[in-house]
Image (cartoon, rainbow, N blue to C red):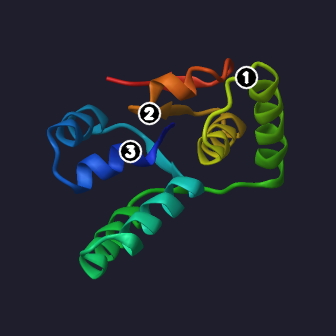
């Protein structure tokens, strides 16, 4: 199972060339969304100038995929990731830590265009095209 970072869906929703590349690559693959990524998509839609249109696009999109929640176990994994990154002076955005924790808990691969940050998490299987 491949979990998608929100940056992939943003490019797909905005019909960017990078979104088309991802869409083609992901065709016929088993994919899901981390719940934190869903939050990021809805927040972006809420703050956008085309709020209603973008909210509808996100609602339609997320209905098509399984959503993986941030659980108690995800919380524990996230705390471990945060502590390790802080000790090495390599902290990343907290939402990215949550997304990584959900991905690790569910033994999935994370597809993202944000390789630089996610590669700091040793056990995380990161995919980019």
Residue displayed at 29% across by 81% down: 52
Between marks 2 and 1, how big is the CA–CA gap? 24 Å
Q: Quadrant of residue 96?
A: top right
Describe residue 113's horizontal placement relative to residue 86 as left or right.
left
Mark toward the start of the polypeptide (2 vs 1): 1
State whether residue 97 is above or below residue 54. above
Quadrant in which residue 25 is drawn: top left
- Residue named by callout 2: 111
The spot of residue 66 in percent (x, y) is 51, 56
| Left or right: residue 109 compared with residue 87 | left
Mark closer to the observer (3, 1) = 1
**Label 2's element?**
strand
Residue 99, quarter of picture: top right
Q: Nearer the viewer, mark 2 or mark 3?
A: 3
Residue 50 shown left or right of residue 76 in the figure? left
Q: Disc 2 to disc 3, how far (Cα)?
A: 9 Å
Q: Position of residue 50 (x, y in %)?
A: 24, 75
- Residue 90 placement (x, y as % from top left): 67, 24
Secondary structure beneath dot 3 equals helix
Left/right placement of residue 120 relative to residue 14 reads right
Label 1 element class: loop
Q: Residue furthest front?
A: 89
Q: Residue furthest bottom?
A: 52
Crowd band around label 1 with a 10 angstrom C-alpha radius: few (<14), some (14–19), many (20+): few
Residue 89's tag is 1
Residue denoted by label 3: 7
Question: How many other residues sit within 10 Å of disc 2, few (<14), some (14-19) or many (≥20)?
Answer: many
């Amino acid at each position: 199972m491949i979990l998608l970072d929100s940056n992939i869906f943003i490019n797909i929703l905005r019909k960017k060339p990078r979104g088309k590349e991802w869409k083609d690559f992901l065709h016929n693959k088993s994919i899901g969304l981390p719940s934190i990524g869903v939050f990021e998509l809805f927040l972006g839609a809420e703050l956008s100038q085309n709020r209603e249109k973008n909210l509808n696009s996100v609602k339609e999109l997320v209905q098509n995929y399984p959503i993986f929640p941030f659980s108690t176990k995800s919380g524990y994994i996230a705390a471990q990731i945060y502590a390790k990154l802080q000790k090495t002076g390599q902290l990343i955005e907290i939402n990215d830590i949550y997304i990584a924790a959900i991905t690790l808990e569910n033994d999935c691969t994370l597809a993202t265009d944000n390789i630089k940050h996610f590669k700091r998490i040793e056990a995380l299987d990161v995919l980019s095209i």
